[in-house]
Image (cartoon, helix red, strand yellow):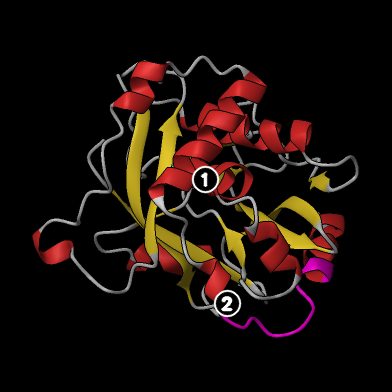
C-alpha cells in the first residue's frame, strides 16, 4: 500500500486550487452531445428513444433547493443489479474504459489495486442510494467537502446528499472531459468518490475509496484510506433527481 500512498501524495502536490469560471457544469445540450459521441464510439446500445426521453433539467424539490450546488449533470445507469436498479460498478467501469480507449496513449493511469470485476474488491458502499437505470439527473457540488475532511468523516455528515460513485467517472470521462485539464492546472481540486468502496487486497477489506486526479495531463485512478484526508482532494456530493 505504501507505493499507492506515495503516488497519491505526488499527484496532490502543486499550486493551490483556484476556482475557475470554466469549472461550471456544461449546458444540457453539450452533455447530451458528449453522451452521443461516447455511445457511437463504444457501442453501448443506448437507444435513440432513451435520448428522446431526457427532457430538461429538473429543479430540486421544496427544502432541498439550495444555492450550494454548482450545477446539474446528466448520468446513465448501465446494467441491472437484479433489483431493478442499475449496476453501479458497471456504470463506473464503462466510463473509465471509455477514457482508456479514447484518450491518448500514456495519459491514463490506474492503480493495480482497483479491480472493477471483483465484488470483493470494488463495490458501491452498502448504505449508498441505488442508482436508476438509464439516464438520470443529479444536482452536484463538484468541490464538495473541505480538503481537511476524510471520506469517513464526510459520510457521517451527509444530510440529504450522498457522495459520488459512477458519477465521478462519467463526469470526468464523458460529459466534462475538460475537467482533468483543469485539475492538471490546479484550477479545480481532485476528487474522492465517497459512494464507492475499494478493498485493496480483494478480500472484502473495504478500507479505501477511489480517487480521481490529473497531473501533467495524466488522468489517474488511485485509492485512499477512508480515515485519512489528502491534500488537494475534496469529496464531491450530489442529490439524485427523478429520471
Kindly identify the residue that appears in the image at 35 percent across and 22 percent down.
Answer: 50
Kindly identify the residue that appears in the image at 79 percent across and 45 percent down.
Answer: 111
**In this picture, which residue range is highlighted in magenta?**
10-19
Q: Which residue is mark 1?
A: 196
Q: Position of residue 148 (x, y in %)?
A: 55, 80
Kindly identify the residue that appears in the image at 41 percent across and 43 percent down.
Answer: 74
Q: Residue furthest left?
A: 62
Q: Mark yes or no: residue 152 visible.
A: no
- Relative to the observer, which residue lies in front, 173 or 117? 173
Q: Is residue 182 left or right of residue 90?
A: right
Q: Position of residue 238 (x, y in %)?
A: 37, 56
Q: Earlier in the sequence, mark 1 or mark 2?
A: 2
Label 2: which secondary element:
loop
Q: Is residue 188 left or right of residue 50?
A: right
Label 1: which secondary element:
strand
Q: Dividing the picture into quarters, in which one does residue 233 lie?
A: bottom right
Looking at the rendered image, the quarter that the N terminus falls into is: bottom right
Q: Residues within 10 Å of mark 1 (few under 14, many from 20)?
A: many
Amino acid at each position: 500500500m505504501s507505493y499507492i500512498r506515495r503516488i497519491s501524495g505526488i499527484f496532490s502536490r502543486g499550486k493551490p486550487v483556484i476556482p475557475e469560471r470554466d469549472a461550471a457544469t456544461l449546458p444540457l445540450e453539450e452533455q447530451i452531445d458528449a453522451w452521443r459521441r461516447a455511445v457511437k464510439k463504444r457501442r453501448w446500445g443506448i437507444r435513440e428513444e432513451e435520448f428522446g426521453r431526457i427532457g430538461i433539467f429538473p429543479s430540486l424539490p421544496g427544502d432541498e433547493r439550495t444555492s450550494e450546488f454548482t450545477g446539474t449533470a446528466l448520468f446513465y445507469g448501465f446494467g441491472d443489479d437484479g433489483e431493478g436498479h442499475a449496476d453501479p460498478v458497471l456504470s463506473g467501469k464503462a466510463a473509465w474504459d471509455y477514457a482508456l480507449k479514447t484518450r491518448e496513449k500514456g495519459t491514463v493511469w490506474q492503480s493495480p489495486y482497483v479491480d472493477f470485476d471483483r465484488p470483493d474488491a470494488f463495490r458501491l458502499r452498502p448504505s449508498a442510494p441505488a442508482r436508476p437505470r438509464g439516464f438520470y439527473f443529479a444536482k452536484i457540488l463538484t468541490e464538495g467537502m473541505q480538503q481537511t475532511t476524510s471520506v469517513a468523516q464526510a459520510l457521517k455528515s451527509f444530510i440529504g446528499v450522498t457522495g459520488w460513485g459512477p458519477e465521478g467517472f462519467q463526469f470526468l470521462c464523458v460529459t466534462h472531459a475538460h475537467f482533468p485539464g483543469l485539475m492538471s492546472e490546479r484550477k479545480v481540486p481532485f476528487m474522492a468518490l465517497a459512494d464507492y468502496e475499494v478493498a485493496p487486497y480483494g478480500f472484502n477489506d473495504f478500507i479505501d475509496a477511489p480517487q480521481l486526479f490529473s497531473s501533467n495531463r495524466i488522468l489517474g485512478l488511485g485509492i485512499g484510506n477512508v480515515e485519512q484526508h489528502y491534500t488537494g482532494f475534496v469529496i464531491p456530493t450530489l442529490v439524485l433527481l427523478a429520471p
